[in-house]
Amino acid sequence: MKKILVTGGLGYIGSHTVVELQNSDFEVLIIDDLSNTTMTVLDGITAITNKKPNFFKIDLKNKDAVANFFKENKVDGVIHFAASKAVGESVKQPLKYYENNINTLIYLLQEMEQNKVKNLIFSSSCTVYGQAKVLPITEKAPIKIAASPYGNTKQIAEEIIADATKVSDLKAIALRYFNPIGGHDSILIGELPIGEPQNLIPYITQTAAGIRKELSIFGGDYDTYDGTAVRDYIHVVDLAKAHVVALQRLFTKKQKAALEFFNIGTGKGSSVLEVIYAFEKANNKTLNYKIVSRRAGDITAAYADTTLANKELGWKSELTLEDALRSAWLWQEELKK
Ligand code: UDP
C-alpha cells in the first residue's frame, strides 16, 4: 500500500481527495495546521471511509517540524494542497501569502529531496491563464501576469517545481483547477467558509439559508450571452478523483515530462445567472439577488479544454452542475445543525 502525504488534507479539496485516496487503497498521512478548518473534518473523512487517516498538526512554515515529519514517516508521494487561498486578502497581505505559499513549498521540496520522495501532485489554478484569448483554455495557453499575489504564488510555485525537476529525480504533476464547488454526497464533509464568503456558491447557499440578505452579482455588462461572467464549475468529488489518477500516473511512470500540467474542469462554461437558475431549480428555492458593478480583478470568461486530462489521465468530470449545487445546499443545511 502506497503512503501518501496530503498537506492541507483537512481543507476543502484536500479532505475530498483524502476520501478518494482511502477508497482507492492508498494510506494517507495528513499534515494540516488547522488555520482554515477544524478537526471535525477528520471525523467526517473517517465516517465516510471507515478509516482514520494519520493526522499531524504541523505548520509547514516550521522547517524543523517538516524535517522531523519526513525523518519519522516514510512516504511514497505528496499531494500539496496547504496554502492560503483568499484572493482579496492576498492583495492586502502579500507577504503573508508569499510566506505561506512559497516558503512552505520550498521546505517541502527540500525535505522530499533529502528523503528521496520523488512524486508530487501540486494544486495549481486556472488563474495562471488570466483572461485567455482563446476559449476553451488549453494547457498551451500563455501564462499571464498574475492579477493578485495569490495568483502569483501559483505561478511562482509552478516555476519552482519546474526548476527542481531539472536538477533532481522529482516527478510532478500540477493540476490547474477551474472552479471547484459542491461537497461529498454523504454530507459529512464540504466547504467551510469562514466569515463572509468570497466565492459564488457559498454566497448563494448562505443567501438561500437567510444568513445573507442578498447575493450581489458582480457585473451584468460582460461580453457574454447574458452579461454575467462565465466560469467552469467542477464538482469537488470529480476534482478529487483527478488527484488519484494523477498519482497513479506518477507511480506507473507514464508521465511524458518531469513536470506535467493538466486542466481540471468540466469543459463547460456557466454564467453567474445560469448558476443561480440551476441552484433554484435543483433545490426548489428562490434566491434574492441584484446586479452590481464588476469586482476588481475578475475576468470575463474561463472554461477548460479538458482534452489532455481526458486522454492522458483517462479522467473526465462525471457529475453535473445540478449535482454540485444540490450537495452544496444539503451541506449548508447540515451546517445549521
Ligand atoms: N461572484 C458574484 N457574486 C459573489 C461571488 C462571486 O457574482 O458574491 C461571481 C464572480 O464575479 C465570478 C464568479 O461569481 O464571476 C465566480 O467567482 P468565485 O469568487 O467563486 O471564483 P473565481 O472565478 O473568482 O475564482
Image (cartoon, rainbow, N blue to C red):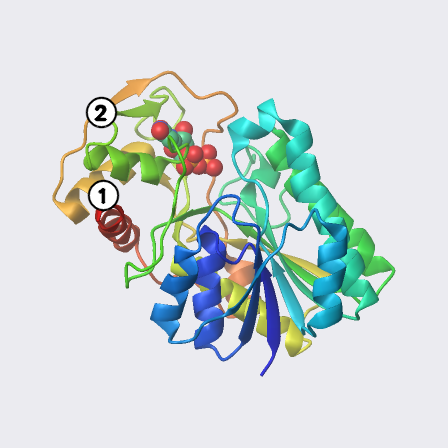
Q: Give the residue drawn at x 76%, y 69%.
A: 71
Local SS, label 2: loop
* Percent coordinates x, y for residue 205 in the rendering: 26, 39
Q: CA distance from mark 2 to mark 1?
A: 20 Å
Residue type at tag 2: Lys
Residue 200 position (above or below residue 138): above
Q: Nearer the viewer, residue 180 or 110?
A: 110
Q: Which quadrant of the figure contains the N terminus?
A: bottom right
Q: Is residue 221 left or right of residue 247?
A: left
Q: Which mark is residue 278?
A: 1
Q: Are marks 2 and 1 in contact (CB under 8 Å)?
A: no
Structural crowding at the residue carrying mark 1, measured as other residues with C-alpha within 10 Å and reported as few (<14), some (14–19) or many (≥20) = some
* Percent coordinates x, y for residue 155 in the rendering: 68, 41
Q: Which mark is residue 213?
A: 2
* Percent coordinates x, y for residue 295 in the rendering: 44, 21
Residue type at tag 1: Ala
* Percent coordinates x, y for residue 114 in the rendering: 83, 65
